[in-house]
Image (cartoon, grey):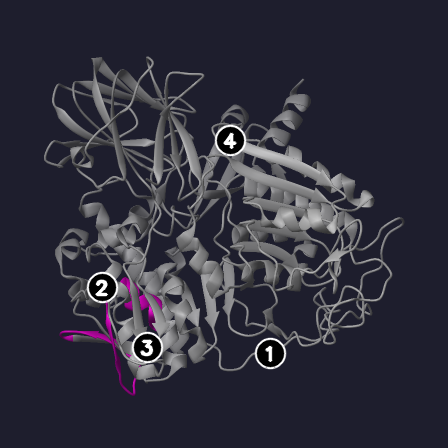
Amino acid sequence: MSIDIDPLSDATGLTVTDHIENTQFEVYTDRPVEPVPTSEDAHYFPVDASVTVETGSVEIPRVAVVETRSGDGTLLTRGDSYAMPAGTYHVGIDPAPTKLYLAFAAPFSVSTTERTTRIDLDAPAEVTLGFRSLHQVPAGTIETPTDPESLMDAVSLLGSALQTTSPERSFPTLRGHPPLIEPGDEFRVPDRVEPLDSGVRIVVPPEYRYLYPVVSLAYYFAADVVPGEVPRIEGDGWTHSLEPEFERRTAEVLRQAFHFDCLARTEGFYPVDLHERETTDLDLDWGRLYDLPLAERLGEYLEVPFERVAPELPQWTLTTDVRPDPENVEMLPFVAGELSIVRSPETVTPATAGDGDGVGFFRGSQADTAPLGPGEFVRGGAEAEPTRGAGASSERGAVAAETDFVRPEPVETVEHAWVGAGVPLDANKATLDAYHRRLAAGAVEQSRISVLVVCNDEQMREEGEVAGLYGLRDMVQFDIEVRHDLTREEMRETLQSDVDFLHYIGHVDDRGMQCTDEYLDLTDEDLDVGVSAFLLNACQSYQQGEALIHRGSRGGIVTLSDVANSPATQLGRIIARLMNSGFNLRTALHVAKRELITGHQYIVVGDGGTTICHSRSGVALVLDIENKTRQEWEITAEGFPNGPYGTGSMMNLNINGDRREHIIPCEMKVSGVTLQELNDFIKLENTPFFHNGTLTWNDEFVQSRDRQLQ
């Protein structure tokens, strides 16, 4: 079973451990309980595990929305403060680290504090609690020849994972993971992969450069992809051109249709007070649109010119460049599952030394290195001849000469991934093996999150203090270890261990990671890697980090150039706090780049969506706060998709002035906030925010403000 449910040892209630998502949280009751396994059929929605306890109350340590349905599933009410009379109820609590449902027959009330949500029954009764992991797995693997026309048939089946063709599929939990694709001599489809007849067709020339950019559309619209000379989307009685500027128009269709589905779904099972429904100034009958079949609904969506709605759309999260090569076909389901905007560049600009972007010395030349301050040093290897094979560079700290750096075209999204040959600047180097490990994640035995900080250089001990930044969480259990001056054999054993996150501080060069006796080359074929995610905070650590991905890791952050010690220390501390706060690798590096220009010397390798834990509120939240007057503040909050809280999830800010739901990704702005309200709000969660353009944290800000007020 992927979910364990155990009584708490030091309080009354339950500990819930989701081994797939590496998540643990607590549910409190008003008395000691012994959970009794119960049929999963006791709940209206599907669950992975179910237990029954006798209690008078159920409380979770987060502010949530409680949704109440009758015994037949009819939605009765939704909110954070209300009471219900005697009856039989199915109750959902969201957000929670897993889907959390209650079933009971009793009058009850719902209440929230600034940190908790509580359900009180009028009298103790049997309550059945159901939990469903937010992890998703594909139904099977499609085998296909990799010529474009054969591949069109496989891409046409990506939408088979959708659990509905209604606008509710804009919720990430109702989309499902697309089936996998792998090359084969013949076209074979598993029995469990059944096509959906949505009535939508995508017509593109049978070329990779046209096929790859429509994979997210094919998935989200459950569309048939067919060959034709003129790129377009069509349904019965309507056609929407994808020319001129094919890739741009494809991205616009995805953004517009998805946004409109999020608005239309408020007419269905989730009639919430949605911010975007109020701000999207269109004279459309959303109730009628909700009831239309998918193809008819999409046709009416696309009658609205994109320019009409563009200013109201949030910044999309991810663009993925997939080179138009047949060897990249296996990445398509993962790219589509993330609802990424996709480009397929036929040519790419090579990046060479001296381009003026701060990462110029790719081949080890230090001609472009910024002057170092007094006492400063870079994190390259010590003076010695490299000991790698004949193909290694002879310069210390250099990426191997056969490595090609590429400069992808800029993107308008928050995150950027690259699929194909070459090392991309300012983009996540995505790899297939890392994405497969995302699906396999969860075969773990421990219920605690393990973080190992390794510092192999006396001069870098200051960054080693990041250990104190991991585990600054309530309700999440961390095992944190700091080790210094490891030998080659000790480092090898460390990498083999099942550590959730490795934070390495030290020197790296062509010989590998510097140890006290000699270097450990991570490209050695006999190296086994169990570490899940990592930060290699050392000079030019790309090759060694990529080797970790190929040998067992899921994702990590590495450097493309020499890095000076002081800014590297700053970045290491920022990444530590962000990962501890539940950010994924890509978003964590995005935030770090806002604070440090040297952040552009780092990229993500592998699965950029990797997290080591979930944030308290589920989503990754970054705040900007600004003094409007001495007494009033303005808060701008950016919410990013993160882990199971993907694109299309909803959230609201627990602050007066804005109680409406917002679609993720989103930007929320609240004005007229008092200092007391601001302090109360930022104390709720370990959250990064920018004050006067500088990155700080809730604990640091509150302490600073308290000192000023004394």
Q: Residue 305, can we see it? A: no
Q: Which is in the foreground here, disc 2 or disc 1?
A: 2
Of residues 50 and 579, the one drawn nearer to the viewer in this rendering: 50
At x 20%, y 40%, the residue is 45
Residue denoted by label 1: 349
Whether tag 3 and tag 4 are in contact, CB under 8 A, the answer is no
Q: Is residue 673 left or right of residue 399?
A: left
- SS class, disc 3: loop
At x 23%, y 46%, the residue is 266
Whether tag 2 and tag 3 are in contact, CB under 8 A, the answer is no
Q: Which is in the foreground here, disc 1 or disc 3?
A: 1
At x 49%, y 51%, the residue is 610
Q: Residue 242, can we see it? A: yes
Q: Which is in the foreground here, disc 3 or disc 4?
A: 4
N-terminal label among 2 and 3: 2
Is 228 rendered above or below residue 303? below
Q: Residues within 10 Å of mark 1 (few under 14, many from 20)?
A: few
Residue denoted by label 3: 242
The image quarter in which residue 101 lies: top left
Residue denoted by label 2: 193
x and y percentages locating residue 677 in the rendered image = 49, 26
Amino acid of disc 1: Thr
N-terminal label among 1 and 3: 3
Which residue range is magenta in the image? Answer: 214-237
The CA distance from mark 2 to mark 4 is 39 Å
Amino acid of disc 2: Val
Residue denoted by label 4: 477
- SS class, disc 4: loop
Q: Residues within 10 Å of mark 4 (few under 14, many from 20)?
A: some
Q: Which is in the foreground here, disc 4 or disc 1?
A: 4
N-terminal label among 3 and 4: 3
